[in-house]
Image (cartoon, grey):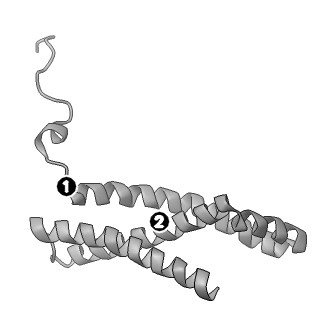
Amino acid sequence: MSDAPSTRPLSPHLSIYKFRPTMAMSILHRITGSALYVGTLFFVWWLVAAAGGPEAFSYASAFFGSIIGQLILFGYTWALLHHMFGGIRHLIWDTGRGLGKETSTRLAQATLVASLAVTLILWIAILIFG
């Protein structure tokens, strides 16, 4: 065995594969999963505040009514929907469908478009009717 350094790349996927929408959606699926964990902690805080009485609930409501709180809720909504549509995409793949290069790319793009569209529609409806 030689002590000479190897000329092989450590991560050949970075130099061989072209970046594709399916790769981006895989990364976003992991990120949204992590964001859902943090967002769920905020949801639990809201539930505990609701059970804790009017003073605790008013503090939580004031936070979620603020600009920062609204941005967190919007991001949580998008993360939840994006993760859900990503799960549906994986469910389709589990049936053996949609695995072709073009179809998987279209499914990845549809995941992003659907999550953004449904998030916007939901928030517009909340602002109008809520």
Q: Marks 2 and 1, how far apart in space? A: 20 Å
The single residue placed furthest to the bottom in the displayed view is 129
- Above-or-below relation of 32 to 113: above
**Looking at the rendering, which quadrant does residue 52 occupy?**
bottom right
Residue drawn at (14%, 48%), measured in percent from left and top? 18
Q: Quadrant of the C terminus?
A: bottom right
Location of residue 16 by image quarter: top left
Q: Is residue 25 above or below residue 77?
A: above
Residue 90: mark in rendering:
none
With respect to residue 9, does 24 lie above or below? below
Q: In the rendered image, which residue does mark 2 sit on?
A: 79
Q: Secondary structure at mark 1?
A: loop
Label 1: few (<14), some or many (≥20) within 10 Å? Answer: few
Residue wearing tag 1: 20
Does the image show residue 100? no
Q: Position of residue 77 (x, y in %)?
A: 52, 70
Helix, strand or loop at mark 2:
helix
